[in-house]
Amino acid sequence: MENKKLGGAVRISNVAIKSGLLIKYFLIIISLAAFISVFDSKISMCAENSREIVDSLGRKVLVPKKVGKVIALNSALRFICYAGAGDLIVAVENIDKNYIDTRAYTAALEDKIKELPVIGEGGINHSHDIEKIISLKPDVIFEAFNDLKQIDMLQKRTGIPVISLCYGDSSWCSEEIFLNSLKVAGAVLDRETKSTELAKFIEILNDDLKNRISSIKIRKKVYIGGVSYRGAQAVTSTDSRYMPFIKAGAENVVSYISDNSHVFLDREKIFEWQPEYIFIDGGGMQITADDYAKNSKYYHALNAVRDDKVFCTLPSVFYFINVETLYINAYFIGKILYPEKFADIDFPKKSAEIYNMFVGKDCYDRMSKQYNAPGKVIFKDDKLKAEILFGK
């Protein structure tokens, strides 16, 4: 009897337990359904306040309809400035804060940049302070180094939409790719008008340059050295697809070597080619001067040096491409190679026009004094220096 009673109690107890579990499961299901309902409504609310943007890598990214705060990493601040949205930046990288005079966009945004917190060093292989980025609550993060893995990781870690912008592919600057990224930035930032105006201005510059060089039959052979690549470089660092040479109707002696823009050469190749004109990028002037002090005989064996046809340009590369400088340098090179075709160009005035359209400020005097460029390169004894040709 005892056992039977005990067995019955056990059976009753098991039923009770099962009933309790069923009730718990039922309550969990109801709670889960309620959570899903709330989550769905949040998603739908989120979708109502968002729009889809396709960035330069073809990624589809949901961004807020109204963007009020942004952070730009990996040289993307240049695009934000070009789009006329510097007022939306809430933090900067050290490379943009500490080297104001080296680029037009940092010079134009100087007052804003000085008051902003720093969220990383900037540049290749430098990490960012993710916690600080999250704490600043930007609506969108922009970047311009185009590392898909890093972009996806950044978006997952911050929970903030990341938009990738791009300057070019195998060429450091492709106008088509650049203009598409400018359009993307304008769309995200609600600055389509400014982006469209800049695109039209670039078209006007291109038409003007094309008309000036259209009748040139024999193109001058030229070389650009001292082009920065992950830092300042000497005369053997060059660009096989240097846009200002193309725009100014020059024949780049390096153009056949590589489809990629940047090339490191053996110095004997320059001697072998003997370009009629040599241009030194302002970013590489000091290293080139140091090299000249050690190897002056080599330089004086170059025809361009002997014929006094060596010039210094404004830096086209500093934390990636200074796009406005490409057009400024095109006009400078055009005036040097084909003065009769560019005789009507007041160079400081033209530069000011280009700077104003790109960054909203005339930076010519500041940039030219920083680099002693555009100018003439003087070789004397064991010293090399640049003298500004077109001062205000």
Image (cartoon, rainbow, N blue to C red):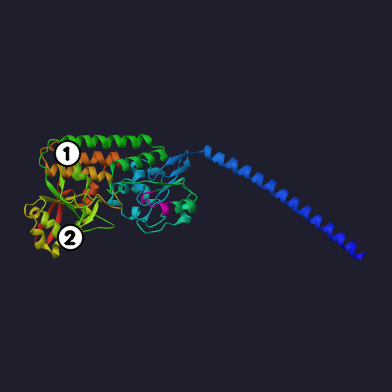
Amino acid type for the residue under numbered disc 1: Asp
In reply to whether residue 21 is colored magenta, the answer given is no
- In the displayed structure, does residue 167 sit left or right of residue 272? right
Viewer-nearest residue: 82 or 154: 154
Q: Which residues are magenta?
A: 143-151
- Crowd class of label 1 (few under 14; some 14 to 19; many from 20; radius 10 Å): few
**Which type of secondary structure does the marked residue at label 1 adopt?**
loop
Residue 194 position within the rendered picture, expressed as x and y whole percent measured from the top left: 35, 36
Distance, label 2 to label 1, CA atoms, is 37 Å
Q: Is residue 360 visible?
A: no
Q: Nearer the viewer, residue 246 or 324?
A: 246
Mark sitting on residue 266:
2
- Residue at the (75%, 51%) spot, across then down: 22
Lateral position of residue 272 relative to residue 188, left or right: left
Element type at mark 2: loop
Q: Is residue 19 above or below residue 382?
A: above
The residue lying at 60 percent from left, 44 percent from top is 39
Q: Observer-nearest residue: 78 or 105?
A: 78
Where is residue 33, by image quadrant?
top right
Number of the front mark, 2 or 1: 2
Rate crowding at label 2 as few (under 14), some (14 to 19) or many (20 or more) other CA atoms within 10 Å.
Answer: few
Q: In this rendering, would 165 be left or right of 270?
A: right
- Residue receiving disc 1: 346
